[in-house]
Amino acid sequence: MIHDFITTHSGFLIPLAGGFLLDALLGDPARLPHPIRLFGKMISFCELKFNKGKRRRTKGIAVASILVLLVFGFLYGIQLALHDFPAVKVVINTVFFFYALGNRSLIEEAWKVECRVQKNDLSAARRQLSRIVGRDTSQLSFQQIRTATLETLAENLSDGVVAPLFFYALGGIPLMMAYKMINTLDSMIGYKNDRYNDFGWFAAHILDDGANYVPARLTAFLMISFPPSSRGFHFVHKYASRHSSPNSGYPESALAGILNCRFGGSNTYDGKRVEKPYIGKNYRELTHDDVVKSCIINIRTSLLMLICTLSMYCIFQELTGFSHNFLYFWG
């Protein structure tokens, strides 16, 4: 029975298992061609060309919509073109799946920051942290550096692992990579400043916020449910909705609750002071053990989401009454 299931659904299972394993072993292939870097170049070209003059919001809506549909259409076309070549399609889908995940690289970057904190090298820790956060790191203390690192680990667990897997379960590689384009758009033009306020409004507040609504809450649920954390549930219920982002507060509240610490506070973005509401009240010194525990939580939650992805796929097929093969998502 299990053998029959694996054989029938290998087009879904092999990229899922293979891509996940490749990310765990290799991380981000910095020296290889990467579709996310291509997405970045496409966004930069469009931003320079269209983010000027009048009707910037309208232009931003058009650019974001076209780019997302272009990615989905291109990957969907590949699924169609390779329908009669299932082995080739499985290999290509596995590679794209690998590119869409980023948990190992996230943990490695966070660990590089922590190594510099451990060495009491404040300048190096600030520089290393600036690679993974958008805030100004030039004046941060060791405590603030660790806080920023843990907040980033939690937020990007949703963006970099849970959300891609969620969309893979719903629509295969085409929908998974369309989400990655949405996420890349938000990271590049989703800033609240004079340059991007209008042009990036649709990408940040409609596409990205909408796409991450369910994954962010699912991330928090997985973090605090296995093993159960009553304080984590309390933090999510009390603090998650206070965050300026409709989604980021959920995984951040979950992690703060598990660690019984305090996130949030004042930070500087693009030269402007931003007051983030506090998540938690226990202002204690964050330690090396907190960073280690947070990395373990990321890995554990990623594995749980892997199981959830398989479950979602099976449930979706049962509820809809037709196979995804009909849509050529997996072959």
Image: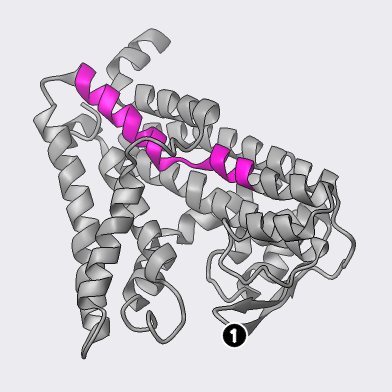
Question: Taken as a whole, is the magenta stretch helix, strand or loop?
Answer: helix
Choose top left, top right, bottom left or bottom right for residue 249: bottom right
- The residue pinned by badge 1 equals 272
**Residue 99 is a magenta residue:** yes
Q: Amino acid at mark 1?
A: Lys
Residues packed near mark 1 inside 10 Å, few (<14), some (14 to 19) or many (20 plus):
few
Q: Is residue 89 magenta?
A: yes
Residue 228 horizontal/vertical position (percent):
75, 44
The quadrant in which the N terminus is found is top left
Query: Left or right: 147 with respect to 316?
Result: right
The residue located at (64%, 67%) in the rendering is: 240
Q: Residue at point 77% right, 41% down? A: 292
Image quarter hosting the C terminus: top left
Residue 199 as seen in the image, left or right of residue 120 = left
How does the figure colour the protein chain or chains? one colour
Residue 45 falls left or right of residue 21:
left
Q: Which residues are magenta?
A: 87-109
- Indicate left or right for 171 with 211 as reference: left
Of residue 331 and residue 138, the one placed in the foreground of this image is 138
The x, y position of residue 2, in whole percent, is 42, 12
Q: Nearer the viewer, residue 77 or 127?
A: 127
The picture quadrant where one finds residue 42 is: bottom left
Which x, y percent locates residue 248?
57, 64
Query: Which residue is drawn at the image coordinates 42% and 23% (left, top)?
Result: 18
Answer whether residue 226 is visible to the viewer in this image: no
Residue 6, quarter of the rendered image: top left
Q: Please tell me whether mark 1 sits on a helix, a strand or a loop.
A: strand
Q: x and y percent of residue 262 in the render? A: 80, 66
